[in-house]
Image (cartoon, rainbow, N blue to C red):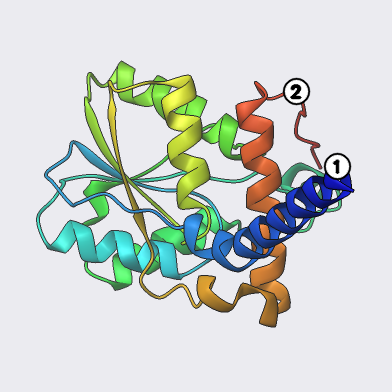
Amino acid sequence: MRRWLILGGILIVLGLAGILVFFKIGEWLVVQDPLAHADVIIILSGDLPVRAMQAAEIYKAGYADQVWVSPPISPEEELKAMKIYFLGEDFYNEKVLLAEGVRPDAIRVLDQASANTEEEVREISRWLHDNNFHQAIVVTSKPHTRRVRTIWRKLIGSDPRLIVRFAEGDPYDGSHWWRHTHDALSVVRETLGLFNAWAGFPLRPSRI
């Protein structure tokens, strides 16, 4: 009898813990560092145009003199073979930056497209080291921030130093993530991405 009571108690505790995790994980995914002067602001691919708009705001506040745009993998080559001209996300991010008041000579689109966040961080690290930069402000979406910080610390460490910021215009609602399909998919994707990072990146990205 006592054994069943103990087992029942353990199951109740586990159940309550699971409920707590369910309701709090959406908020837990969102982190942000205090703004400080950096060598460069970097826009990770995705969530056009809010990430670029946030980067422009940080730039105009004087926190960095350059803005880099990280391009995603795209079907450009396949479309080019069909004589279809493709305008990628990086093209529109650059247009948003210009429209928001960033100087043309302050914008740089990185030349290597990335399939996922791990590849983006590796490519950004290469560019930062090549330019002898030691501090970067990285702009992404709200639920993506914890994974970016985790991957950065795992692959880069503390130099160059990361300042992760989320786009204020991101409509993600971490307190009620289960109410909207987009938010729910974000939580699932970011949670799986964190497990992949903690496990040493056993899962590799697929490419178009």
Tell me where residue 88 appears, x and y as whole percent: 60, 56
User: Helix, strand, or loop for circle 1?
Assistant: helix
- Residue in view at x 27 percent, y 63 percent: 56
| Label 2 Cα crowd, 10 Å radius (few <14 / some 14-19 / many 20+) | few
Q: Is residue 110 visible?
A: no
Which residue type carries mark 1? Arg
Q: Which residue is mark 2?
A: 202
* Mark pair 1, 2: CA separation: 39 Å
Tell me where residue 204 appears, x and y as whole percent: 76, 28
- Residue in view at x 27 percent, y 20 percent: 159
Q: Is residue 49 visible?
A: yes
Specify whether 171 is left or right of 63: right
Specify whether 190 is left or right of 107: right
- Residue in view at x 66 percent, y 41 percent: 193
Give the label on residue 3, or none.
1
- Residue in view at x 40 percent, y 75 percent: 169
Q: Earlier in the sequence, mark 1 or mark 2?
A: 1
Tell me where residue 16 appears, x and y as whole percent: 67, 62
Tell me where residue 189 appears, x and y as whole percent: 70, 53
User: Helix, strand, or loop for circle 2?
Assistant: loop
The quarter of the picture where residue 168 lies is bottom left
Which residue type carries mark 2? Pro
